Amino acid sequence: MGGTMSPYEDPRLLRIPVNGIEVNVAVSGTGPALLMLHGFPHTWRLWSAVIGPLSEHHRVIAPDLRGLGDSTRAADGYDAENLARDAEELLAALDVDHAAVAGIDAGAAPAFLLALRRPDLVRRLVLMEAVLGRLPGAEDFLSGGAPWWFGFHQVPDLAERVLAGHEAEYVDWFLTAGTCGRGIPAGVRDAFVAAYTGTESLRCAFEHYRAMPETARQIQAATAAGRLTAPVLAIGAQPVGPALYHQLRRVADDVTGRTIADCGHIIPLDRPEALLAALADFLD
């Protein structure tokens, strides 16, 4: 797919020190803050089709997660609690004392833990296309086992060595599958490929998967200690569907579920108009 001209200004790119690293973050617009956390294999540009419209009514804050994009290639700290601390310190550095938070894929767990730990900071929460650790509710989605790449990515030192020199083909597989074969704009695709090229870039990406067992323990402990009180919107597509909603129903006081039809995993690029409509209904 080719790109199209946008009537919106490009976001400002800032580099902000937080929690022992430097985070690359795109910021656009004024109004109530909206923090948006991407997943794999993405950068902040995952949100490029929705940042402009959202920035008309919100101050959109879209960082590259730890180790990804142009953020620091950190040696460690990829568990969800630490990623939530990255996000918390980023908001503090930008003088934000309350925000809506959205997370998709690998960005969902830190968004969830941030909202659970800081109900004073997170006023509304949007989670998309993810499974939260081992919380009950996702049994149907996981009936055939976790997606194949979870295990591949978790083996130390393996995937980054095997994939070196073939990063573009690997990233393209996820981008094609994540849009039901439709693909994404060429410029965004090229940015994703560049961000995940090189053994060190791949290592950092896979550290997010290697931290999943610890993240699952953190989610289990946090939900045993208290419930999520912020209103939460769970958005599903293909392949996760309503699994995340079913998990959240058990641990959240106020949860709304929505499934976007004919939409792949990469919701913000595959069906941006549908996502904008869902966010407008929930945030406003």
Image: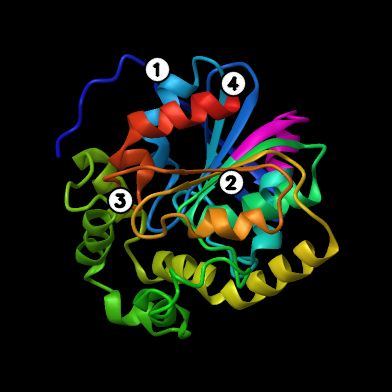
Q: How is the image coloured?
A: rainbow
Which disc is residue 284 wearing?
Answer: 4
Range of residues picked out in magenta: 89-101
Across and down, in percent, residue 143 comes to 43, 78
Bin the neighbour count of mark 4 within 10 Å (Cα to Cα): few under 14, some 14-19, many 20 and up: few
SS type, badge 4: loop
**For discs 3 and 1, the disc positioned in front in the rendered view:** 3
The residue beneath circle 1 is 9
Q: Amino acid at mark 4?
A: Asp
User: Tags 3 and 1 in contact by the CB under 8 Å rule?
Assistant: no
The residue beneath circle 2 is 23
- Tell me the residue at 61%/77% (across/down): 213
Residue 135, image quadrant: bottom right
Distance from disc 2 to disc 3, alpha carbons, whole Å, reads: 28 Å
**For discs 1 and 4, the disc positioned in front in the rendered view:** 4
Bin the neighbour count of mark 3 within 10 Å (Cα to Cα): few under 14, some 14-19, many 20 and up: many
Q: Amino acid at mark 3?
A: Gly
- Tell me the residue at 57%/66% (across/down): 137
Q: Earlier in the sequence, mark 3 or mark 1?
A: 1
SS type, badge 1: loop
Magenta stretch holds residue 96: yes
Residue 241, image quadrant: bottom left
- Does the image show residue 60? yes
- Tell me the residue at 17%/53% (across/down): 181
Is 4 left or right of 91, judged from the image as shown? left
User: Tags 1 and 4 in contact by the CB under 8 Å rule?
Assistant: no
Q: Earlier in the sequence, mark 1 or mark 4?
A: 1
Distance from disc 2 to disc 4, alpha carbons, whole Å, reads: 28 Å
